[in-house]
Image: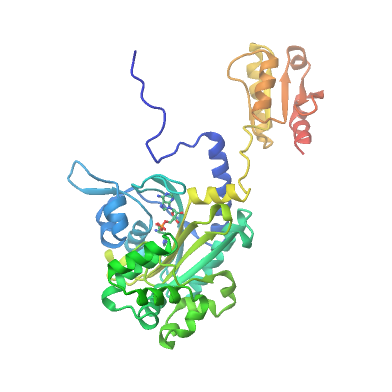
Amino acid sequence: MPEYLPTAPYKGTRDFLPAEMSVRTQVFGHLYDVLERRGFLRYDGPILESAEIYERKSGQEIADKQLYTLTDKGGRRLALRPEMTPSVARMIAGSAKSLSFPVRWYSHPNCHRYEAPQRGRVREHWQINADIFGSDSANCEIEIFELVHDLMAALGATPDMFVLRVNDRNLLTSALTDVAGVSQDHLSQVFALVDRWEKYPREKLAENAAEIGLSDKQFEKLAETLGAGEALLDELPSEVREQSNLVRVLNSSAGSLVKYEPMIVRGLAYYTSTVFEVFDTSPENRRPLFGGGRYADLASMFTPQQIPGIGFGMGDVTLMDFLDTHGLTPAPRNEVDVMVIPVTEDLFDAARSVAASLRTAGLRTSTPIEHRKLGKELTRADKAGAVAVVIVGQEDWAAGTVTVRSLATREQSSVAVADAPAAVQALLA
Ligand code: HAM
């Protein structure tokens, strides 16, 4: 017995068979339309990058635990990209001379992270990235938040289905030090604790806090500060608030697009101020869907030029879960609108010429590859989701006609060959 290899893909990766791919194509098509309508330009790049670009700026979680690394035959240390932002920062830095900033770019890469596969987490995911480069203005934040709402609306989501939760790491630093009394020495560890705030039960957080060296009283004060919501803003020093783009957004009409949430941190190390995540409000799927933030100096790995960026990565796994949860997943598209069936083998050429005229008229059309009985081909056409078949018979063809049959009503009529496209279109309408 030969030993067969498994047909399942590598753990944590997925195959997309045509029906699933059809759903994905429709979903992503809507998202590309929204981005293009806002003037975002699409770019792409290699899946392999120097491992160093993640080790320098993305933070320990990605660099130490999740990176797929390899050494090529020339001894270069490479990684499968776990995210797109360091790559796009490299591209922006490399082409900065020819760009007129600010620029809006988007991409749709696959990214690899070595993670324990679970709901919402896999080892290869696709991420729509949208970023604005070269401006410190709060108008970037507003535009990105509007974009998030437009993208969600294009998928059929209504505003009650999700919340755009926002924070500013500088506001958080001030909340921790000026309001909660956290010392500078504890700051980075407390940041990591805040990042776990909504994932862990209270007792575990308290344990972690004690390990860091916070007293019970300090932990209580921290919990009170993080739970204060928008009221916390009034307690922060005015010079901190004045510096914050997020506060500008909250004070503008765009404030209604977002919810200020003091405990949002986000995992990546390179965010420098605004951070945000989109959260599903359904009780069945209460989880972050995607997120992003502002990074003042990611490009500084590649250039002395200061090029700030802000944007987000929208993952396909969490997005598809969201669409399923809310009944928004589109149906796969049918294979063809119409099939042209030759009754005998010698009519294949005739069938192909009829099919060509139907395609010219914009109809998605196929013809059989092998000759089978008419009944079998009708069943196939039905399965393919065709609305009609055009039957090419010996005598009809000699008389310059074909038979157009509706698969829904099974009614059929004989029409001149030249009139076949119009007859099929009438059945489609
Ligand atoms: P991130 O939060 O690491 O940010 O990932 C963004 C999104 O990608 C997540 O919210 C999630 O939807 C999806 N994602 C990440 N890892 C996985 C995984 N293992 N399985 C399934 N989905 C996943 C970034 O990657 C930033 N580079 C985004 C960004 C762009 N920030 C600014 N511009």
Q: Residue at x 40, y 79 (%)?
A: 175
Q: Farthest residue toward the bottom?
A: 238
From this viewpoint, is residue 303 visible? Answer: no
The reply, left or right, for residue 231 in relation to residue 327 is left
Q: Quadrant of the N terminus?
A: top left
The reply, left or right, for residue 88 in relation to residue 152 is left
- Where residue 94 sits, quadrant-wise, is bottom left
The reply, left or right, for residue 361 in relation to residue 104 is right
Q: Residue at x 28, y 78 (%)?
A: 184
Image location (x, y in percent) of residue 54:
29, 57
Image location (x, y in percent) of residue 115:
35, 47
Q: Farthest residue toward the left?
A: 75
- Where residue 411 sits, quadrant-wise, is top right
The reply, left or right, for residue 298 in relation to residue 144 is left
Image location (x, y in percent) of residue 230:
52, 77
Q: Residue at x 51, y 34 (%)?
A: 17
From this viewpoint, is residue 428 visible? Answer: yes
Q: Residue at x 45, y 48 (%)?
A: 126
